[in-house]
Image (tube, grey):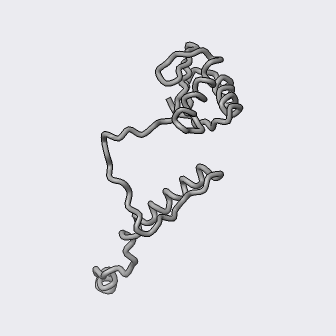
Amino acid sequence: MAKRLGGRFEAKPVASINMTPMVPVLLALFAVLAISAAQPEKAVRLYIEPGYTPAPFDPDRVEPRLPMVTMRADGGYFVGDQQVTRAQAPGRVKQLAQSQSFNGAMIRADPDVPLENVASMVNDLHALGLTSELVEY
């Protein structure tokens, strides 16, 4: 019986498709889909003008940043590095945003800050015509 099965299990090349070149393509496709699924209300811009060359990196160039409101668990509010009261925070953010030609602000809150306080700050900024982005602390 061993003689009869001997020829069946010889080493033969396996005919299959080489998937190695497709892995980066699939990862890039997955990344685009994951980003677009996370933000369905925003369009993902995939078109790049022919001949577009990005500017070289300049470590000395400082990019302007959105004004940031920091909400601490002890009740402290900061706009940038300046401590302000809760009532002053939206107005101060509006001043900074207008001085830098921005229409938004970032909100950073300690994990112990009640969600109602964060939502109230978002509503106050929206009432002043500013968009808001929440930053994980």
Image-quadrant location for residue 14: bottom left
Using the image as rendered, state which of residue 74 and residue 96 is in the foreground. 96
Q: Quadrant of the N terminus?
A: bottom left
Residue 78 location, x and y as percent? 53, 20
Using the image as rendered, state which of residue 12 and residue 118 is in the foreground. 118
Q: How many numbered markers are drawn?
A: 0
Using the image as rendered, state which of residue 8 and residue 58 is in the foreground. 58
In the rendered view, would you say 37 is above or below 120? below
Q: Could you tell whether 41 is left or right of 65 in the image?
A: right
Residue 44 location, x and y as percent? 56, 57
Q: Could you tell whether 49 is left or right of 120 in the image?
A: left
Residue 113 location, x and y as percent? 59, 21
From where the camera sits, is residue 83 visible? yes
In the rendered view, would you say 14 is above or below 116? below
Image-quadrant location for residue 128: top right
Q: Residue at x 37, y 81 (%)?
A: 15
In the rendered view, would you say 74 is above or below 54? above
Image-quadrant location for residue 63: top left
Q: Residue at x 44, y 60 (%)?
A: 27
Q: Residue at x 45, y 61 (%)?
A: 28
Q: Residue at x 29, y 85 (%)?
A: 3
Residue 134 location, x and y as percent? 57, 34
From where the camera sits, is residue 108 visible? no
